[in-house]
Image (tube, rainbow, N blue to C red):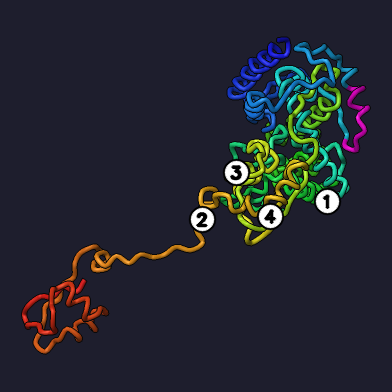
């Protein structure tokens, strides 16, 4: 009963949060100088992750974690404690504290508490992928929390501007870094491929600026905007010195990143407990080179279709194209052997229903339709002296038999001055 009450309270809290997010895309912060500063919110703070969370609760995929004591009360924290905790985070990227950073930390710790609980649980699924890629490209591991502010750890997140996935790639940038987008597949939603692409993009930005805060800012608004701000600031290349020359949302981006690192590290100190996702403890991948539907896998293997979609978010219509290239199908580890044992049955299970693309199709010839021109009207010819059925048929590219059939002629005799139907 107590757990049910907690769930209901969370749902009410999230409904309030979602309503607030629909009406506010910026916050007003009082700076150290005493003036009010309007700062745009990163997309991850505005995303619909909460609706996904509510959906999963209703399907019993998520339960309350036991890692920390979760309460509705956020303790009051002094600036000195915030500063001390930020400095204890083992990070290469500097994480200074100011009024803007405090505002974002308190936003996560108060009205976005349940979103933080969701993202902490999503970490278990996506962090191993992100950490492996960042280690491969030798990037600071604290960058792994960028998806917190980009997408709220939702691989299907889509911004109003068209950015998609954990890393919120726009289509143009995605193509530059090798992420494909078709009617069936959007690799921006593939956690593995998009993370590798994001790692390369971040590394390329660092090669330009050699400053991680500027890399973060450029990731948000693009190098062109940052270069313009640097010129306007007389060549200054420190984020905080460029602050007044940056767009509103970019001003809040680095503070939001610092706050994301803080809350994902010190959530227990704010009485936030991760949610336990009822996703598989381990997964494995199979290489698919033939058209296949997740619905076929679910039906034959007895798998949960929503779980398969959660593990394979890049397949927009549940269909793995196959044919031209190989795609990875991620399955719960125990299901891999089931798939291999029943592979033929899976591919042969209602392909006409779930794949829906015919490889060949017969063309039916309708003589009545063929007898009409492209305008749908019958065509006639007035017979001249010396013309025969054969010469008329040759002139119009039809057969003598067709002229005989259309005009009820049994032989070949025709009379000049009469009209004969051609089509």
Q: Which residue is drawn at 15% across and 86% down?
A: 388
Which quarter of the rendered picture does the C terminus lie within?
bottom left
- What segment is highlighted magenta in the picture? 83-93
Horizontal arrangement in the rendering, residue 244 relative to residue 261 (left or right): left
Between disc 1 and disc 3, whose residue precedes? Answer: 1
What is the distance, in whole Å, between disc 1 and disc 3 at their CAs?
Answer: 44 Å
Horizontal arrangement in the rendering, residue 111 relative to residue 69 (left or right): left
Q: Picture coordinates of residue 398 (x, y %)?
A: 25, 78
Between disc 2 and disc 1, whose residue precedes? Answer: 1
Of 334 and 341, nearer the camera is: 341
Q: What SS does tag 1 mark? A: helix
The residue at which mark 4 appears reads as 288
- Point out the residue furthest to the bottom here: 386
Image mark for residue 295: 3
Choose mark 3 or mark 2, whichever is in front. 3
What is the distance, in whole Å, between disc 3 and disc 2 at their CAs?
Answer: 15 Å
What is the distance, in whole Å, between disc 4 and disc 1 at their CAs?
Answer: 36 Å
Which quarter of the rendered picture does the N terminus lie within?
top right
The residue at which mark 1 appears reads as 207
The residue at which mark 2 appears reads as 357
Choose mark 4 or mark 1, whichever is in front. 4
What is the distance, in whole Å, between disc 3 and disc 4 at their CAs?
Answer: 15 Å
In the rendered structure, are the residues bearing label 3 and label 2 in contact, judged by CB atoms less than 8 Å apart?
Answer: no
Q: What SS does tag 3 mark? A: helix
Q: Picture coordinates of residue 385 (x, y %)?
A: 9, 87
Between disc 3 and disc 2, whose residue precedes? Answer: 3
């Amino acid at each position: 009963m107590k757990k049910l009450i907690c769930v209901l309270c969370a749902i009410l809290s999230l409904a309030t949060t979602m309503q607030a997010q629909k009406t506010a895309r910026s916050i007003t912060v009082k700076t150290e100088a005493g003036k009010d500063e309007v700062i745009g919110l990163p997309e991850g703070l505005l995303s619909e992750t909460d609706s996904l969370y509510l959906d999963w609760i209703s399907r019993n995929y998520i339960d309350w974690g036991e890692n920390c004591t979760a309460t509705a009360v956020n303790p009051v924290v002094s600036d000195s404690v915030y500063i001390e905790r930020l400095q204890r985070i083992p990070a290469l990227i500097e994480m200074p504290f100011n009024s803007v950073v405090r505002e974002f930390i308190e936003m996560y710790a108060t009205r976005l508490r349940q979103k933080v609980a969701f993202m902490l649980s999503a970490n278990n699924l996506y962090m191993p992928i992100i950490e492996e890629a960042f280690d491969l490209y030798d990037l600071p591991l604290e960058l792994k929390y960028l998806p917190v502010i980009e997408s709220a750890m939702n691989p299907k997140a889509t911004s109003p501007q068209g950015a998609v996935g954990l890393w919120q790639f726009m289509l143009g940038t995605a193509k530059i870094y090798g992420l494909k987008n078709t009617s069936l597949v959007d690799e921006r939603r593939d956690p593995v491929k998009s993370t590798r692409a994001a790692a390369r993009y971040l590394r390329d930005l660092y090669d330009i600026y050699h400053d991680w805060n500027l890399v973060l800012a450029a990731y948000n608004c693009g190098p062109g905007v940052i270069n313009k701000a640097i010129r306007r600031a007389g060549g200054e290349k420190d984020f905080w010195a460029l602050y007044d020359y940056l767009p509103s949302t970019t001003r809040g981006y680095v503070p939001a990143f610092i706050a994301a690192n803080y809350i994902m590290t010190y959530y227990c100190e704010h009485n936030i407990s991760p949610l336990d996702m009822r996703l598989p403890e381990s997964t494995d991948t199979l290489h698919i080179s033939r058209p296949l539907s997740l619905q076929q896998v679910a039906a034959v293997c007895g798998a949960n279709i929503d779980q398969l979609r959660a593990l394979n978010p890049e397949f927009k219509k549940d269909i793995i194209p196959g044919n031209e290239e190989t795609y990875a199908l991620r399955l719960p580890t125990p299901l891999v052997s089931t798939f291999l044992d029943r592979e033929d049955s899976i591919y042969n299970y209602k392909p006409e229903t779930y794949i829906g693309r015919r490889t060949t199709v017969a063309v039916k010839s309708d003589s009545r339709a063929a007898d009409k021109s492209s305008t749908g009207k019958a065509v006639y010819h007035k017979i001249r002296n010396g013309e025969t059925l054969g010469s008329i048929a040759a002139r119009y590219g039809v057969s003598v038999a067709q002229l005989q059939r259309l005009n009820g002629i049994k032989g070949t005799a025709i009379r000049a001055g009469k009209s004969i139907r051609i089509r």
